Image (cartoon, rainbow, N blue to C red):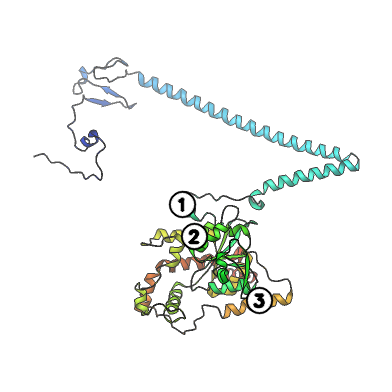
Amino acid sequence: MAEFTYTKYTQAPVNDNHFRSSFPMPERPKPHLAPSLYSDDLVYNANANNSASSHRRPYNRPTKTGLVFRTADSTQKALNELTQKRHEAMEKRRASLLLIGLLFFALCVHHVTYNGSISDEKNSIESKDIDNTAVATVELSENTETQADTATTDLNSDEPINEIIPAGKEFLEPIRYFAALSTPRRPGDANFFFHIPRSGGQTIKQIFGRCLGKTLASEVGIRDGHAEDPTLMAVEINNAKYVNVDTTSVDGLHRAATLGLAESNLSDVIASSYFHTASMLFDLEHKGRAFTLLRNPIERVVSTYYERTQGENADIDVSLEDYAQGNGIENNWLTRFLTNKMEGELTKEHLDQAKDILSNKFLIGMLDDGDETVKRLMKYFDLSFNSDETRRMEQEDCIQELIKDGTNVNKIGYDLPKKGSQAYSLLTWQTQYDIKLFDFAKELFDKQTKEWGSKERRKEMKKRKKKGGDK
């Protein structure tokens, strides 16, 4: 019995011919064809086994089967034609190169002639009376400045830069209105602090508001009934200035975007934990300049656990092991919020995207390197101390006090789980992508020292390189 191969289709065949093609059909017998040594054409041999009786059909004479055959000298003719075509192509190529050379020579001559004419014109202007000379000098100066501005449009112009998303980087499209770290600052750019919970975010916000006297957009501005204000304004609450919006909630971000928070220039820093949602605040003319403060993921989730079980607003009562197994823990918080993958399983692709976003969009700060971090964010956000010496010293003391006794200090006195324990293994599993992302961020922090680091840190890195500590 003949054997048939069963093919499984995921969808119905488009037509009968497609269906019939799945089953092999018997092949029809073909005439004996001998391949030519000089071309892909086939030479018909009526009697391949008897060379004495073999013959060839006339050149280009069609057979009953529709095939066309060549005579013996047709191959040499074809080779001659190919040789002639190659020669013609080489001549065309030489002519093209000669033409390009002539054009380049003409451009050089034009450039020299143009510069010479400009020089002659300048000399003639200087020979005129003093009034005409002054007018001509002003015009020449204006033209020169215009040319210089045009040449440096990409660096100093206020024109918005529309980021080009390369192929394979489509995940950057939703956050295109966050400025790339490598692009120059524009007057309309807005400073954005991506607040990671239990990572020193409250300390940073107090440094901005209480120490440096800057106006914040956070959750505080809607207190005292300001959530219903029809327009934006800066309000003073607890001796600090805030914009009357709440940027720490999704609804609050929608309200802030509707009221035009970024273009209002009322806030010195906008703070939110919703990175992707906050992108609605910005546009091409008012891009977000992002900064974040990072903490070791294991330390962060343990701090979160004790805050939720023993803090002032405790809301759960479970053991650390149960918490780590999924009873309240945040799975890879940072990776999910950077990639906007809030549900489902994470993959290495999401980790790679998060790394790309951090390196492309963020100035990195480290909780355990607070003094250096504050210096970097002030430089990146274009912030400065008060010009008055006494006030400056007060600001510096305020910052040092907050760095030393920050909001995430271990006031409960808990211990981190030991490596090898069940709790530590479970926490590591729940934060495996964040741990890898944190290690990558530490490398970024060192790389960003060259441009944004303090003078002291740059000198320190140079010394380490000389000693061979860093390669």
Q: Is residue 259 left or right of residue 302?
A: right
**Which residue has dot 2 on it?**
277
Discs 2/1, front: 2
- Quadrant assignment, res 68: top left
Residue marked by disc 3: 396
Which residue is tagged 1? 170
Q: Position of residue 114 (x, y in %)?
A: 74, 36
Q: Secondary structure at mark 2?
A: helix
In screen coordinates, is 266 left or right of 327? right
Residue at 58% across / 52% down in the picture?
284
The type of residue carrying mark 1 is: Glu
Quadrant of residue 414 in the image? bottom left
Q: Is residue 236 above or below residue 147?
A: below
Can residue 239 be spotted in the picture?
Answer: yes
Question: Is the residue marked by circle 1 packed among few (<14), some (14-19), or many (20+) residues within 10 Å?
Answer: few
Q: Residue furthest right?
A: 129
Q: Residue at x 23, y 21 (%)?
A: 45
> The disc labelled 2 sits on which kind of residue?
Thr
Task: Choose between 350 and 411: the one closer to the eye.
Answer: 411
Whether the residues at callouts 2 and 1 have beta carbons within 8 Å, the answer is no
Q: Is residue 289 above or below residue 459?
A: above
Instruction: Give the Cα distance between marks 2 and 1.
Output: 17 Å
Q: What amino acid is found at the position of numbered circle 3 in the picture?
A: Glu
